[in-house]
Amino acid sequence: MSKQAVFTMKLEHELREEFMAEAEASHRPASQIVREMMRQFVQRQKETREYEAFMQRKVDIARVDMRAGVGMSNDEVEAQFAARRAQVADQG
């Protein structure tokens, strides 16, 4: 990937000095580390948005099912699993 853009930022002097020292200690250019951090951030943001969209679709489907009378209420689910827990406890 060609590097054609310049990114300028303001930060505290102490943070810059610590960062530069750690970059040097890891034998890597500071710009490479910043690019990696930016890529990781972008990837995390994308994954978060995708997960939130996935969960929203699941919620939307569940709401449609509940309105259609297909789902169970929380009380029904709790009762069903309480019965299952009791059954497993009796077997053990």
Image: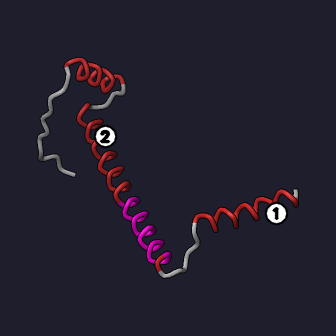
Please check the rendered image and state whether residue 61 is part of the magenta-colored stretch, yes or no: yes
Residue 37 - label: 2
Q: Is residue 34 left or right of 48 when viewed as pictured?
A: left
* Residue at screen point 22% across, 52% down: 1
Corner quadrant of residue 28:
top left
Viewer-proximal residue, 20 or 80?
Answer: 80
Q: Earlier in the sequence, mark 1 or mark 2?
A: 2
Corner quadrant of residue 30:
top left
Residue 5 at x, y percent in the picture: 12, 45
Tag 1: Cα neighbours inside 10 Å, few (<14), some, or many (≥20)? Answer: few
Viewer-proximal residue, 54 or 2?
Answer: 54
Quarter of the image for the C terminus: give it: bottom right
Q: Which residue is mark 1?
A: 87
Amino acid carrying label 1: it is Gln
- Label 1 and label 2: CA atoms lie apart by 50 Å
Determine the secondary structure under disc 1: helix
Residue 32 at x, y percent in the picture: 27, 37
* Residue at screen point 44% across, 67% down: 59
In the image, the segment drawn in magenta is 50-66
Residue 60 higher or lower than 4, as above or below: below
- Count of picture labels: 2
Residue 25 higher or lower than 8, as above or below: above
Chief secondary structure of the magenta span?
helix
Amino acid carrying label 2: it is Met
Residue 35 higher or lower than 90, as above or below: above
What kind of colouring is applied to the model shown?
secondary structure
